[in-house]
Image: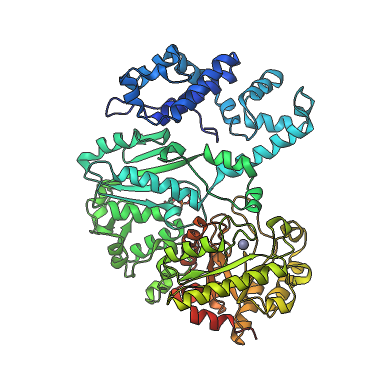
Amino acid sequence: MGSGTPWKLPKARAKGSPYFSRNQISKVLHQVGVLLELNGANPFRTRSYFNGSRTISNLNDDLGDIINTGKLTELKGIGKGLGSSIRRAVLDGEWVEDWIELFESTPNGLIEMLGIPNLGPKRIKLLNEKLGISNIAELQISCEKHEIEELDGFGKKSQQKIIDGIQLLKRFNARRRLDIGLLYGNALKNLIGNIDHVEKIELAGSARRRKESIGDLDLVVGAEIKFHETISNSILSLPGIADVKGAGGSKISVILDTSIFENKFNLGNIDDGVLEAIGGDEYEKMEASGTIDAQIRLVSLNMFPFTLAYFTGSKEHNIRMRQRALDRGLKLNEFGLIPLDKIENKVGIEAAKYSLEAKSEKDIYKMLDLPYIVPELREDLGEIEEGEKNNLPELVTSNSLLGAFHNHTTLSDGEATLEQMSDAARKLNWKYLGISDHSQSLKIANGLSPQELIAQGDIIKKYNSEWKQSNTNFRVFHGVESDILENGKLDYKNEILETLDYVVASVHAIRKWKNRDEAENTEDLFNAIENKYTTMLGHPTGRIIQGREGYEVDMHAIIRRMGELNQEGIFKAIEINASPYRLDLDWRLCKFAKMCGVPISINPDAHDISGLKDVKFGTYIARKGWLEKSDIINTKDSIEVMELFSKRG
Ligand code: DGT
Ligand code: CA
Ligand code: ZN
């Protein structure tokens, strides 16, 4: 709901009764309630819709069964009138006239305004009545003219909140984080994959290339042409399709919402600092009621590899490939790879009849004298040149990881104990786990006093010796995530740091660092990495995707210096913070780090058990940054890790 999409009543399922799912009914009831509020209906009436919506969404039994056994109006909050409207929708596939009228007559601008956090239907109605505001643009102008703060019941504070809310909404609508895109994309892929006669389906576009944020989802579906129409109809009646922007020929454009998820949409545990940077509770609410656009291409099986390659992109990579084809007297497009002398004046699918055959994308690359190039590398950043020399990297995979180093426990701001975290790591088949709780200066994250840190070390030693005695191939490395203080100092005395296996050094006073210039920040980071006890640099720029840019710093200079230190035999690594909110180091700098000889650590920055699995996103970014197994320190075994960590200079 909200997020700028006009509301529409869902289309009835083509297969027949039940025509609508429980989620769809619950959502429509909620929307009717909101629309009534926007139109100033009496509160009892609106409340009955909200109550009904909640009752339906909390049902344990199947909605169709409840209706068929006549038990619908026995449910709390479902009166006779509402019950009969729901029955008609579910059994006959028809919405009642009142609701249709309500959906059609409410201006889209008012519905768009519902996407602004903290601005409910009642206040939107008031703004509309008092100031004639009927869309977000008008609201913004009114705020800028300070008209809102003059209104009864509003004031300066709520005017500022509206301005902030409009900002958040705009940011949210522009692009979405990779993890969110993949959640929606994979859900849709599974649903379409289960439709009869669908033989091939792949996610394409920036999601397949693992960009850190994506504009819209692209999916390519392969099936025999005679089934295309029924498949297309089935796609349009899938759950989670909030709206259809267009469906013609081979292209279907839809808007997805969270009802695509079988279980309630859950973002999991978000680190407090991160949550604040992306908009706090308002962000969570927006995500839970968000939407995302998806373009689906339905093509024949022989066209599938060409369409997939084309819509995987990037555009820059495609342009290079098309030129390669031309150099060989061929035309490459989403339909095929066609000898120019056969095309004459035929276009599109007509010309594609003469296409060379490809069973998979691999064949397309082969016909253009290249080895297969994985999607992550398709950015025209050297992959064609290296491919020509047969010199493409063998990219790291999640399976190669033997552990991870940047993790928190309940001793600082984590949600799981040391025991729970180690158990979870062993279940992932890891051979070690690094624990690095926050350091003493970071009071809000419950940073560890020197005594607490030492005591934690004693417990870890005890566990390690127990595992050793029982011949369990697992150990915990004791580290700390030391805050980088004034002048780049670490947060404990050397005697304390000396007792640790390793130190992750990270900046947390982001506000302060963002107020300083690049030279100052770079200087302090130099001091931090040159500290004898710093093993690796944590979330190097402090950026939060969709939240805030990092502080200004000459990251190239930092990486170069770390490379020099490694050359001198002193171990200094840099992390790819694998939290999907961070993905910092950026993939664009990974190749540079590798070139300078700086080892990379894929660090989940886990604050609970499920956070450990974020290494998956870090691996995507490492792959996108051309990194191989040997570039990543958490692919090494415990003994090698110990050796590396001991190279302190
Ligand atoms: P996004 O959605 O902004 O995160 O990025 P993409 O890469 O998914 O881009 P999108 O959705 O506009 O198009 C999907 C792919 O289709 C794109 O990566 C390459 C291909 N494509 C789209 N437009 C063009 C074009 O004008 N020329 C070429 N060569 N390829 C295009
Ligand atoms: Ca896209
Ligand atoms: Zn951390």
Location of residue 117 by image quarter: top right
Name the side, left or right, on which 254 lies relative to 49.
left
Q: Residue at x 49, y 78 (%)?
A: 638
At which x and y percent is residue 123? 66, 24
Quarter holding the C terminus? bottom right
522 or 158, nearer to the observer? 158
Residue 293, x across and y down, in percent: 46, 41
Q: In the displayed structure, would residue 387 be above or below residue 144? A: below
| Place of residue 41 in the rendered image (x, y in percent of width and height, measured from the top left) | 58, 14
Tell me the residue at 51%/22% (across/down): 51
Which sits in the foreground, 321 or 515? 515
Answer with left or right where residue 631 lies relative to residue 127: left
In the figure, residue 62 lies in which quadrant?
top left
Q: Residue sitting at 40 percent across and 61 percent down?
A: 375
Residue drawn where x is 41% and y is 47% of the image? 185
Residue 625 in the image, given as x and y percentages of width and height: 50, 67
Report the number of discs.
0
- Residue 86 visible? The answer is no
95 or 131: which is nearer to us? 95
Which quarter of the figure has residue 368?
bottom left
